[in-house]
């Protein structure tokens, strides 16, 4: 049973070269342009080093540390990552 669970977990944790985020999306999240993630931490968990994270305009207040070499690209307007110090 443990081997079966490990295989299922690995299938979910597939890394990608390009991930999309959209804070206003609702539905099943896969990190694709049609099924984007809602949180930056999900994108960082599943992106390859050197990959690209495309972020739709909006606010993404989840706290993250970016430790990978990735390109972060805004689409459709400004993007706020993290919580401003004035709101902490």
Image (tube, rainbow, N blue to C red):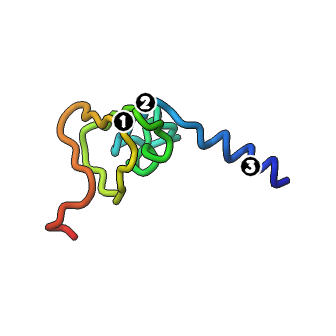
Q: Please rate how many residues cluster around mark 2, counting C-alpha atoms within 10 Å: few if below 14, some from 14 to 19, many from 20.
A: some
Separation of residues labelled 2 and 1 (CA atoms): 6 Å
Q: Secondary structure at mark 3?
A: helix
In the image shown, does 22 or 44 lie closer to the viewer?
A: 44
- Estimate the spatial distance between the alpha carbons at disc 2 and disc 3, rounded to whole Å: 25 Å
The residue beneath circle 1 is 53
Above or below, 71 against 87 in this view is: above
Ranked by sequence position, the earlier of labels 2 and 1 is 2
In this orientation, which residue lies closer to the viewer: 67 or 75?
A: 67
Q: Which residue is mark 2?
A: 18
Few, some or many residues within 10 Å of mark 1 (<14, 14–19, 20+): many
Q: What is the C-alpha distance between the residues marked 1 and 3?
A: 27 Å
> Horizontal placement of 47 versus 13: left or right?
left
Density class for disc 3 (Cα within 10 Å; few <14, some 14-19, many ≥20) is few
Where does the image place residue 10, in percent across and percent down from the top left?
A: 67, 43
Q: Residue at x 42, y 51 (%)?
A: 41
- Which residue occupies the foreground of this view, 22 or 41? 41
Lower position in the chain sequence, tag 2 or tag 3: 3
Residue reaching furthest to the left: 86
Work out whether 81 lies above or below 72. below
Query: Where the C terminus falls, by quadrant?
Result: bottom left
Q: Secondary structure at mark 1?
A: strand
Task: Tell me what residue is drawn at x 39 percent, y 35 percent.
Answer: 20
> Residue 55: x, y in percent?
31, 37
When asked about the image quadrant of residue 44, the answer is: top left
Q: Position of residue 49 (x, y in %)?
A: 44, 37
Give the left or right position of residue 43, taking residue 66 as reference: right
Residue carrying label 3: 6
Q: Are marks 1 and 3 in contact (CB under 8 Å)?
A: no
Percent position of residue 23, x then y: 34, 45
């Amino acid at each position: 049973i443990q081997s079966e669970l490990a295989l299922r977990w690995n299938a979910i944790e597939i890394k990608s070269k390009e991930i999309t985020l959209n804070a206003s999306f609702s539905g099943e999240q896969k990190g694709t342009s049609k099924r984007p993630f809602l949180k930056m931490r999900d994108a960082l968990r599943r992106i390859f080093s050197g990959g690209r994270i495309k972020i739709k305009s909006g606010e993404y207040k989840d706290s993250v540390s970016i430790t990978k070499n990735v390109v972060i690209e805004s689409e459709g307007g400004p993007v706020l990552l993290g919580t401003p110090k004035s709101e902490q």
